[in-house]
Image: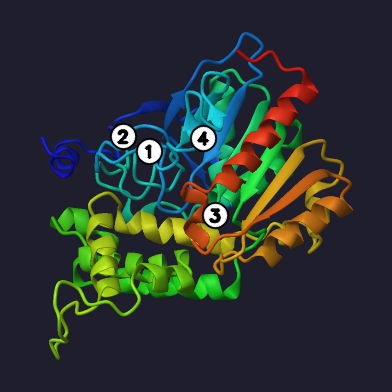
Amino acid sequence: MAPVEAKRARNEANDPSSLVMRFGPDRPLALDAGVDLAPFQIAYQTYGQLNAARSNAILVCHALTGDQHVANAHPVTGKPGWWEKLIGPGRTVDTDRFFVICANVVGGCLGSTGPASRNPATGRPYGLDLPVITIRDMVRAQVMLVDSLGIDRLFSVIGGSMGGMQVLEWAASYPERVLTAVPIATGARHSAQNIAFHEVGRQAVMADPDWCGGRYFEHGKRPEKGLAVARMAAHITYLSESALHRKFGRNLQDRENLTFGFDADFQIESYLRHQGITFVDRFDANAYLYMTRAMDYFDLAADHDGRLADAFAGTSTRFCVVSFTSDWLFPTEESRTIVHALTAAGASVSFVEIETDRGHDAFLLEEPEFFATVGGFLGAAARARGLDLP
């Protein structure tokens, strides 16, 4: 069975192709929206073995369009895990030494409770009846998962973009449970420009007639065109102008001359259309609304009377902050703001800016300096703590 056909045969939102931790009505998730979510579930994957001291666990937090399948073949697309080049036996995050956990965030669509999940009160998908989810809510759910796995303290929490926001939230809210933190290509709050891009994407989804006010499952429809346009617009922000020029320029797509029509004359047009079409096969439109909104609401300093340094006051967590020179979605100055706040709070922090023209997506690609930075930081932290790693 082809990957997309398999997806349609199996409802990944409710019966995911991964481990699942379920929490009953007696263990609700308290949400920032002021309500409890119960029952709920978290879909997750693990790699490697937890050592006897339970001291080698690394939590990987995924970005907006990621999921728990960080280092294994994706059950829907069949493609390799989104960080397989970084995580695995003998790799930078060595699963022969570390126990790696990656969970689908609450509000997602690959098995953790989200808008595509079955609402136990109605038997139908939640749709927009699901309360709005925040980054802090995602982290609270991850804490409950980690508790259920019997882990008191994580060796590291690592993530890029929206995943980096989760890393910062972990370090701010649960510093005693995080030995090291690696926030990558991220910010302590979402900028007005990024909120604007997200709003364009949400409006594209909601303008699709097949969105049906968020009840498209009940009508046997999916707002594929709107979600594809949202993905196309967002994908542009993940790349740099120099990378786009290097890869595509003004090259024509499978033709020698302009058609003087509105087909995909240029390679970049064809590329973006492909990104949109393939995205709708693995992602839920309402989940896109919820997760972009969670990023928009994130503002760590606002939770501490406007002083970002206060979010990390007294922390013993060791930080490694990473940015990329050509990332204009989360530019280096946002990483420097985090570093300055950590320094003001007296935290142990190192900072590396990676030279690359690959834009925001660089953290998902094979960048040798990036891999060396992460590997060196984790190795030094393990040696400093004298951790008993396999």
Earlier in the chain: of badge 2 and badge 1, it is 2
Cα–Cα span, label 4 and label 1: 31 Å
Q: Which residue is mark 3?
A: 161
Quadrant hosting residue 50: top right
The 10 Å Cα crowd at callout 4, few under 14, some 14 to 19, many 20 or more, is some
Provide the secondary structure element on which disc 3 rests.
loop
Three-letter code for the amino acid on which mark 1 is drawn: Gly
Between marks 2 and 4 in the image, the one whose residue lies nearer the viewer: 2
Q: Is residue 188 above or below residue 52?
A: below
Which sits in the foreground, 234 or 115? Answer: 234
Which sits in the foreground, 76 or 94? Answer: 94
Q: How is the image coloured?
A: rainbow
Relative to 316, 128 lies left or right: left
Q: Which residue is mark 2?
A: 73
Q: Is residue 282 above or below residue 151?
A: below
Residue 107 disc label: none
Q: Residue at x 89, y 46 (%)?
A: 346
The 10 Å Cα crowd at callout 2, few under 14, some 14 to 19, many 20 or more, is some
The 10 Å Cα crowd at callout 3, few under 14, some 14 to 19, many 20 or more, is many
The answer to whether mark 2 and mark 1 are in CB contact below 8 A is: yes
Q: Position of residue 232 (x, y in %)?
A: 33, 68
Cα–Cα span, label 3 and label 2: 22 Å
Earlier in the chain: of badge 2 and badge 4, it is 4
Cα–Cα span, label 2 and label 4: 32 Å
Residue 81 disc label: 1
Q: Is residue 54 above or below residue 176?
A: above
Between marks 4 and 1 in the image, the one whose residue lies nearer the viewer: 1
Three-letter code for the amino acid on which mark 2 is drawn: Ala
Residue 28 disc label: 4
Earlier in the chain: of badge 3 and badge 2, it is 2
Q: Position of residue 211 (x, y in %)?
A: 24, 65
Provide the secondary structure element on which disc 1 rests.
loop
